Image: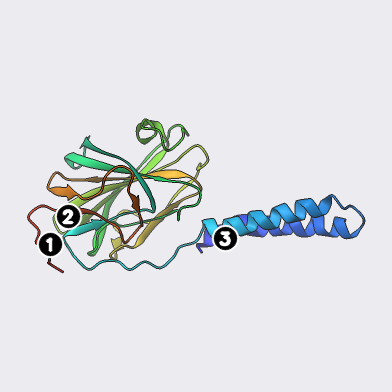
Amino acid sequence: MVKNAWNFIVPALLIGAAFGVLGMDGYPCAWAVTGLTIVFAGFCAYFFRSPQRSIPSDPDILVSPADGRVIAVEPVEDAWLGKGVEIRIFLNVFNVHVQRSPFTTPAQVEGTRYFAGKFLNAGVPKASVENEQHWFRLASAKRRVVVKQIAGLIARRILPWARPGDALAPGQLIGLIQFGSQVDLIVSPDAAVLVKVGDKVVGGESVLVRYKGARKGKA
């Protein structure tokens, strides 16, 4: 569980305890509030989980930067990468909400950008363009990618943890989005996308991309 969970759990438990005291003083309706706060605290503990993942060792692949469901695989033009392919992943409120470096090799944060925007449902196509978002520009050797954290209808706080100049271990955590959201990965044209719309992916483990010309058996 990431430390941000306590920002929600502690207030909820304090409120629940206060209403519990009222319940013991003869206000039976107060117990309902206590029960709801305990349920909410439990949900927050579940939502802010950060399970250990087994990062593959193959240097010629990219793993998913997030848990969720692939909702689009489209050509895109990026100011940093040029022509590329964008893989969009939708995260519902029950998915793990931390984001990871997609590289299975050490990487570097070459830059970040923040864009103010709307809070549309993260599952609609224009959310990738119009919603509030934060971008990481990551590089490993000569390979470069962009990872986008995109806010949604409920998710209204993006928390980037990695900073420009940071060195990243394979699959290292780079950020968190609070509640339902979207995470996009932009790769260069020399990367062969191995997933399709509708596929469920696991951050740090599901292989999204293999670079063209790389040997499949290479580890």
Could you tell me if residue 21 is visible in this image? Answer: yes
Q: Residue at x 22, y 64 (%)?
A: 105
Q: Residues within 10 Å of mark 2 (few under 14, many from 20)?
A: many
Q: Is residue 90 above or below residue 110?
A: above
Q: Position of residue 167 (x, y in %)?
A: 28, 62
Question: Is tag 1's residue or tag 2's residue first in the polypeptide sequence?
Answer: 2
> In the rendered view of the protein, which quadrant contains the C terminus?
bottom left
Question: Which mark is nearer the camera, 3 or 1?
Answer: 1
Mark 1: secondary structure:
loop
* Left or right position of 80 against 175: left
Q: Residues within 10 Å of mark 3 (few under 14, many from 20)?
A: some
Q: Position of residue 188 (x, y in %)?
A: 17, 45
Farthest residue to the right: give it. 26
Q: Residue at x 18, y 64 (%)?
A: 59
Q: Quadrant of residue 26?
A: bottom right
Q: Residues within 10 Å of mark 1 (few under 14, many from 20)?
A: few
Q: Which residue is mark 2?
A: 210
**Distance of label 2 from label 3 (alpha carbons):** 35 Å
Determine contact: label 1, label 2, CB under 8 Å. Answer: yes
Q: Which mark is residue 20?
A: none
Q: Which residue is mark 3?
A: 45
Farthest residue to the front: give it. 198
Q: Residue at x 14, y 54 (%)?
A: 211
Q: Which residue is mark 1?
A: 216
* Left or right position of 30 against 211: right
Q: Position of residue 48 (x, y in %)?
A: 51, 58
* Left or right position of 95 against 40: left
